[in-house]
Image: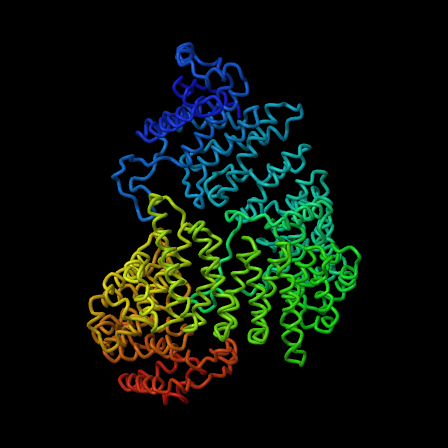
Amino acid sequence: MSAVSSPQVNPPSADALLLLATLSNPAVTSHIEHTEALAARDRALGASPASYGNLCTHFARTLAMTSPSALPESETAKLAQAQTPALHQLQVDPNAWISLRQMAGLLLKNAIASPPPANSDPSVQTDGLGRPAGGYMKLLPEYAAEIKPILLRCVSDPDLNIRRVASTTVSSAAISNKARGRMANMPISEWPELLPYLLGCVESGLTDTGRNENAAAALDGSLLTLRKMIEDNPTEFEHNAGPAFANLVPLLLGTFQSPTDRVKKEGLRCINNLIMTMPGGLIVHMNDYLGGLSALAADESWEVRRLVCQAIVTMLSLRTEYLQPHFPAIAEFMLKATSDPNEDVALEACEFWLTVASLEEEACTNEMYEYVGGLLPRLMPVLLRGMVYSEEQRIELLDANELDESNAADRSQDVAPIFHTSSAKRGGDESDDEGEDPDEDNDWNVRKCSAASLDCLSSMYGPEVILPPLLPGLKESLEHSDEWIREAGVLALGAIADGCSEAMVEHMGQLHPFLMAQLTDPSSIPQLKSIAAWCLGRYSHWAVDQVHAGQPDILGQMTEALMSRALDANRKVQVAMCSAFGVLVEAAGDLLVPYLEPVYRTLMQALSMYHARSLVTLFDILGSMADYLGPVIGEGSLPSIFVPPLLQVWHQLARNNPLDRISLPLVECLASTALVMGANYQPWALQTFDGAMSMIERCLMHLSTSEDNYADEEADPIVCAADLLDGLVEGLGANFPALLTSSTRYGEHFLGVLHTLTAHDVPGVRMSAFALFGDLARRAPGIIQPGMNELMAEAIACIDPMYPSVCNNAVWSIGEVCVKCEGNPDSLKPYAPDIVEKLITLLMGNAVSSEGHTLVVPGIAENASAAMGRLAKVNAADFVGPELGRFLLGWCEGMAKITDPTERRDAFQGFVLALRSNPQALQQASHNRAPSSAISSILFAISSWHIPEDGSGGSGANLISGDFAFSPFPPEEAELGRALTTLLQEIKASLGEDAWGQVDKSLPVNVRRLFRENYGL
């Protein structure tokens, strides 16, 4: 240790100190001086490798200098001449010198972790990821050789703040962090003395019995540094640390016996971060590690106990096999820790049960399953208690209730908008969460973890195991006079809805009226009303079943109750009611039609009183009503109840702030509404169209003034507005061109705006633009005809799997254009070669990232297969057939995955035409060997038509060797079925009996029988 830290450190220059003094003391430095100092730093770091290394060295020297008294007279004289307020502050305030050293360390860390480009010439190009083509500055060996021992010396500095900044700098310099885009400037592999020095400090600190302050500081700083390096990249640390790594785990285990809490905590953090990579040293000492955790389980420090629980949960999640032999003792400890008086410890311990219930089947042994099942009678009461708000939380919530009812407006920047996504949109991700627990805060806490654990455990064990130990405590909670405890009971009741729904049917006759009473009782606290609404939503399928069983009034009662509370003064209740009604809409669907008029009238009344947090939820629910109820919302007088008020709110929001994020879920809601209402939306179509175009126009203007320095989220208004335009296109169909004509302000600019959006920098904008382009091709192709060259060029350019959603929509839109070009191949002739080349890359899995990794994009093979089929239907012989041998295998694999009936039909029809135009593709696809592999691919693709959509045919294993029940070829596609039969018989005839016999033998028995019985093979 001393050999590294003993060399004399040269003093920094006066110029460096003056720069640091200006930057570290803003209280006595003007803004202009501070800005000039930053510019001077950047110039020095970016001028040349020598200038970069020189300034980094002076930063390091300053970090190590404990007092200005060490400066030589020449440098002191220079500082005296400067006479700046910042320098004067250094002379009169000892703490200012510590701040200066910290600033030096931070600037050194930033310079090393985020170095400037090696070439500061702005004309030098960047690569595809925005990185300078010439790379970044790197410390020259002579500068690194001086900085390294200085940093090690500072890791052991007596001042904690200096140790912290030095440890961060060492970690940033020695270990890369790809997640943050950081490469190591002084990699640990080229710093052989680093780990031995740190471990030497740890060993000296642990064995020191004289309470030497220097040894204690070195121990603390070394553990900090080790922890940060392991956190940043444990794999790189292990692989490049050298032979000294073998001593790491034993020394860290020694920290568990330290009398100092801080040492124990850092030692635990270090080893806990090694669990993911599980180095050999930890495996060898696993029993010692587990024994050490056991010894610390009852430590007086709650932070130590929390880290012990964290270690166990991490091991359970990632390395279950090491806990399996000790699981009973561990589970007993975690059960006790779940009731720890310290909430942080209890939360970490509660994660254990959630993790157990989330383990893969092979990780959770029968012994583990049985033992946790045996603990349930003791665990259920603990989880129920964990769901009850603490006294402190209750006080905070009651204060928040008063604030919520004060009618003060929310600020839009404090509200994360809910983006409603229509289930009718391509690529939509339909949620199945049945509403969220209406706790307003997003902090993960014991209450939420307890409820989530109960939820997962109920699904894991089922009602037969869960309910016997749970129901007595649940009944006690629901009947309790304390409404906070009742609230926790309702949360528990909702938590088991998924795992125990069928078994709870016999109790719902009593529980449902109870929940309705908690919801509608004016004296109930808002938290109880909210959780009752959420719980009702969780059991909404039971209510639907009751309607089918002959109790039609139950949905009307629920709707009336929820709507009455929707006008509650408390915003949490408002949000909970809207969310619960949205879940009910999903479950009940058309059964709610008789109640729509009063529902819409109530929601529009709520619209006039809601503020931001409630509004975004209301907009989302209105969008869900459009999705799940469909065209019925546009019938009769219903649209006049809710469409004009929504447009009025949008107009008011746009007038106050055209880019107000609260308007985004409103616009998405209108998109779903316009889509399902169809022609019934016509009275409001022009106002909606102009509003969407205005939103796009204003956002484009805003982004154009940002000098390309904006986040993708700033373009969200464009995305939402484009989705609204798409909703109008799909809803109005052939009437959309007339809408363009009627818009005197934006009609003639529409096509130009669409082209602008397809070429936009933000991927989300391009994704929505190509969805709009594809729907225009389907519904109103005449609109895009004048701009076809530009739009097709952008679509082809965006067939890039680096941006999966954009790529998928671009491919889909091209396929829709192809559909409209059947019978007119000349219109596609200029683009066909580029389309085919792009699609081949997708079909054959040849797309790679900038780092050389193969890109696998969900859904892209199916989309590309459909698009290739549609292109072949335009002109198979000239466009697709000549290159068929290059991608026949990938095309077959993609076609087998297509689920959309129309796209699958088009793909296979195009394939038949392409193969007929180039029969030699079978030989080419098999690389000029026997064409059996290509034929097998075709047969398996065709067999996909016979796999039942509901999965009733059997398992995948049965498909190969068992008794799989294939379904007949769809009768509505009989013509295609005949074409495929003819194609297969022609292929068999061309091969001859012997060659076909080899193909036939390669097929599983089930598949062979399928083609013999259905295709005459």
Nearer to me, 778 or 165: 778
Nearer to me, 941 or 515: 515
Is residue 142 in view from this perspective? Answer: no
Does 467 sit above or below residue 9? below
Nearer to me, 102 or 625: 625
The color scheme shown is rainbow
x, y percent for residue 459? 64, 65
> Residue at horizontal 68%, vertical 59%?
529
x, y percent for residue 376? 73, 60
> Residue at horizontal 41%, vertical 22%?
19
Quick check: 821 left or right of 974? left
Quick check: 884 left or right of 237? left
Examine the image and state in which quarter residue 908 appears.
Answer: bottom left
Quick check: 100 left or right of 160? left
Does 470 sit above or below residue 30? below
Is residue 181 in view from this perspective? Answer: yes
x, y percent for residue 242? 47, 38
Nearer to me, 93 or 1000: 93
x, y percent for residue 479? 79, 61
Q: How many marks?
A: 0
Quick check: 430 left or right of 399? left
Does 851 sit above or below residue 624? above
Examine the image and state in which quarter residue 57 appears.
Answer: top left
Does 71 sit above or below residue 679? above
- Quarter of the rendering occupied by the C terminus: bottom left
